[in-house]
Amino acid sequence: MPPTPPARAPTDWHAQELLLMREVMRLIGRSLAPGLVLREMLHLMSELLGLNRGRIVLVDDAPAAADEPRTASIQHAYGLTQAEVQRGRYAWGEGITGRVLATGQPAIVQDIDAEPVFLARGVERSQLPPETVAFIALPIEVNNAPIGVLACHRIRSRQRHLNDDLAVLRVLATLVGQLLQLEALVAEQTRQLEARNAVLANALNTKSARYGLIGSSPPLLQALSELERVSQTQATVLLLGQSGTGKELFARAVHLASGRRDRPFIKVNCSAIPDALFESELFGYEKGAFTGASTARAGWFEQADSGTIFLDEIGELPLAMQSKLLRTLQEGTLVRLGGQREVKVNVRLVAATHRDLAADVEAGRFRQDLYYRLHVIPIHLPSLAERREDIRALALHFVSRANQAHQRNVNLSPDALARLEEHPWPGNIRELGNVIERLVLLTNDTLVGRAELDRFLPAASVPLSSPSAPQPPAATAAAERPAIAPAPLVRDYAPAQSHSVVVLQTALAEHHGNQSRAAQSLGLTLRQFSYRLRKAGLK
């Protein structure tokens, strides 16, 4: 007779339960992601306790229409094919699963073949063992309300009490509910934090970049505060400050903060208009007013009607035009060149200048009555040296803009940003923007450090970190200065003697007397060009 095989040792179900619980808790400790924890829990249920084809059915989102029934579907499963998972959708009260959802009470089917309500929708009966199969379904609750079902198949012939399986499943169903509740709480807190961060970010952006003006330094905020206080009035605003401080952006901010924000904003650079064309440019002309005037044309004031007109460098306005401008501002009317009819205009004027208009009035270069008409609300625009704490934000803004414009990927290191804050920036924001754009275009480094940045800064500049340091003699300084090719911007700040009389006269002749274009051709600002003309006795 063949030898009798040795009897199998009885399964230590208690040890299996403890192992299951320990592994599930370990998973929860490692990750709160439900997908990973719940699927592994269903796997352990099958491998350790023989509770096969486990699935977690969760309530679907609320139906779009009130008359549509609520449904639930299998969200996590082990031992089911993708097709079986897709079929596992149940209406409220439908089958065993739907009944557990509707009543919140557990359901135990001793024999699925003898239970007419059992649907066998997820797993067809032919796919299950031929012996008697039981089905256990327990509600998953959050705040004492069923939000899902934990269910599995069980072979009846196993040497394990059904009540023991039921006790373990109750614990697991409770854990699942707590895990899902925790996930919902974390998701809600995350959503609230994201919403709050969005509000804060918007507030910061609004504060540091209102109307396109970047920065949060006290001098800038003071100018913005004054601007906003007068923006709703109709009073004329005079912007005072050095060249390159952003007068056009401030003028546009006055317009955007006013009730005229949806109307035209016209900007006119008075220094770029030849004296002979001022009247026709500002006030327009009628047909036949001069040779070549084949049609009538509305001037800038008419085009700005009901909106805002910005006259930049108003100190360059000829005396003859100053009286006509004063009349337009006082009476709200104008007469086109060659015309006889008065045209009414409703325009808010914002003017800007870097000149000392009071000194020009005393010298007879600017009308006193127009000066008082313009000087209703003067706003001083701070230089970049006065708002040094904004340099970092401005530099990062210019880097981002230049990278986008030129498809580059250049960044500034912390020490490079610190170096920018040390620089005096006599050319203000315009100079900073030009240096950054040149750096982005010409550097070979992705991350620009202090040493690389120095190559693009004007060689004659002295860092502000040592303002009282003794200066070496000229010869020694020239010998010790690094042999670095000066950037094009250096020429902007050369002394007044850097251009001869002949060079200045030639530039004016080449550009038909247009000082703005002549200044650009020499790499100078209009103010610097005018200064050199006066020094040379040409103005």
Image (tube, helix red, strand yellow):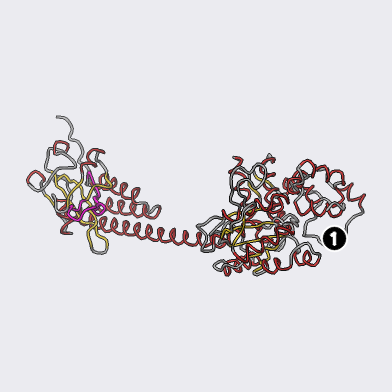
Is 58 contained in the magenta span?
A: yes
**Which residue is found at the position 61% from the left and 52% from the top?**
299
Label 1 belongs to which residue?
Answer: 469
Q: Is residue 392 left or right of residue 458?
A: left
Residue 180 percent across, percent down from the top left: 31, 56
| Residue 210 in view, yes or no | no
Q: Nearer the viewer, residue 470 or 524?
A: 524
Q: Is residue 356 left or right of residue 194?
A: right
- The span picked out in magenta is 52-71
Within-10-Å neighbours for mark 1: few <14, some 14–19, many 20+: few
Residue 293 percent across, percent down from the top left: 63, 44
| Residue 312 in view, yes or no | yes
Q: Nearer the viewer, residue 148 or 301?
A: 301
Q: Nearer the viewer, residue 488 or 10?
A: 488
Q: Amino acid at mark 1?
A: Ala
* Furthest residue in direction top, as rendered: 1
Which type of secondary structure does the marked residue at label 1 adopt?
Answer: loop
